[in-house]
Image (cartoon, rainbow, N blue to C red):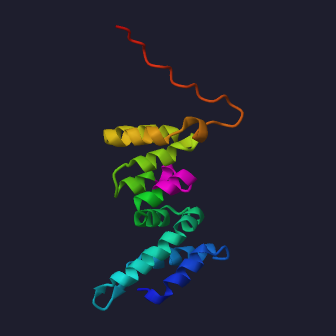
Amino acid sequence: MVNARTYPLWRGLAMSEDLPQEALKTVVEALCAPAISLHGIDSQADRWREEALKAALPTLLARTSAKRLRNRLLVQADEKMLAALAADGTVTTADLPAILRTRRVWAGLVAGLARHPDQVEAAIALLPRLPGYEVEQVVRDWDLDRHTRVEGTAPAPRSPPGPVVSR
């Protein structure tokens, strides 16, 4: 059990470059454990914990390679945060089993993964698991020229115009 007043301290430790690797597990556990009082879960203190974790999550995921700790952190993040981290490259296809264990596939995750050339195939494999309206959102957000083109290659060809039908 962590004292709710210390969440800013835990956040500061998590974001510190001086934090030793050995202390990472303790910091993750402190930020992931629900805030409990004598009468059960303390909702105000848990909001403080969530805010501290949300601020420290990108840094913690970037520093954590242990599968169990990464999974613990990924379960705590919301879909918007995970999609942003996938777009940044912090969340990768290796994290998909942990994410999909507790969530369904959503457009932001697929589009975020697809922004990295080495993850395009995995993003394409997730498309059939999306509802139709979310596939359209992925297609809209997925700019092949901007996200998957390697420097020095020609841009992707534009879609040919549809067939011309004359009456």
Is 88 magenta? The answer is: yes
Identified at 48% across, 67% down, the residue is 69
Q: Main secondary structure of the magenta part?
A: helix
Specify start and end residues of the magenta stretch as a single range.
83-95
Q: Position of residue 31 (x, y in %)?
A: 47, 76
Task: Determine whether 109 is above or below 142 in the image.
Answer: below
Q: Relative to residue 166, is residue 98 depicted above or below?
A: below
Left or right side of 12 for 37? left
Residue 14 sits in quarter: bottom right
Indicate the position of residue 88 as horizontal and vertical percent values.
57, 54
Left or right, residue 54 beside residue 136: right
Is residue 75 located in the magenta-colored stretch of the structure?
A: no
Is residue 35 at all visible to an observer of this figure?
no
Q: Is residue 44 visible?
A: yes
**Quarter of the picture holding the C terminus:** top left
Q: Residue at x 44, y 62 (%)?
A: 74
Most extreme residue toward the front is 167
> Residue 30: image x %, image y %?
47, 79
Residue at 56% from the left image edge and 61% from the top image edge: 65
